[in-house]
Amino acid sequence: MGQNTSVLFVCLGNICRSPTAEAVFLAKAARAGLKLDVGSAGTHGYHIGKQPDKRSQAVGVERGYSFKGLKCRRVDDKDFEKYDYILAMDNSNLDNLREMSPPEHHEKIHLFLDFANSEDKEVPDPYYGGKRGFELVLDLIEEASDGLIAHIQQS
Ligand code: 4NP
């Protein structure tokens, strides 16, 4: 059930939220026995080729997640063909993705937190804030990852 599903996480810079989502979701999917194709990308290209932000890595590693091999890239046209789920961290990412995507792929694009139980609908950009913001990002991503795994298992 749900094997071979592909998921792309998208934020603005692809150095804080979406690589964190990739790392968390990969770990949780593996624990659930799912083999999925998981990636992340940014709508903008400020940091192409860079590793995830050190602050994201620090809070993620504290909770046992691995960021090895992750490298920043920008969303490209092939992503809209390739991925089954394209998940935006906030409404601005969602709007940008809808503008970039051919209309026939719009149905693949959702807010990631649509899969969480939380009242929050956006994963807030932590880039200009402190450690607490990065921990909140991780809390929201962990919850939405559990919801997305349950959704994929049922589909
Ligand atoms: P992200 O965070 O979208 O979660 O990767 C940001 C990273 C970089 C910038 C903004 C947000 N920036 O302005 O460079």
Image (spheres, grey):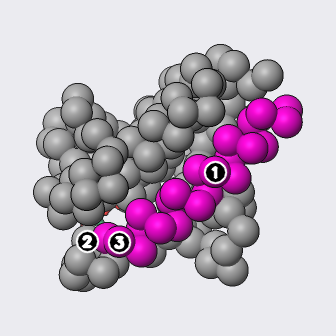
Q: Residue at x 56, y 72 (%)?
A: 122
The image position of residue 126, as x and y in percent, is 32, 73
Q: Look at 30% across and 81% down and name the residue there.
A: 132
Q: Is residue 74 left or right of residue 81?
A: left
Q: Residue furthest right?
A: 155
Q: Amino acid at mark 2?
A: Tyr
Quarter of the rendering containing residue 103: top right
State the residue in front, 7 or 148: 148
Residue at the spot of label 3:
135
Q: Answer few, some or many: residues within 10 Å of disc 3's Cα (few below 14, many 20 plus, some between 14 and 19).
A: some
Q: Is residue 78 visible?
A: yes
Residue positioned 53% across, 40% down in the render: 28
* Amino acid at circle 1: Asp
SS under mark 2: loop
Query: In the image, residue 40 lies at what x, y percent?
Result: 42, 40
Where's the N terminus, which quadrant? top right
Amino acid type for the residue under numbered disc 3? Glu
Q: Is mark 2 within 8 Å of ligand 1?
A: yes
Residue 125, given in percent of the width and then of the height, sits at 38, 72
- Mark 2 or 3, which is nearer the eye? 3
The rendered magenta stretch, by its main secondary structure, is classed as helix
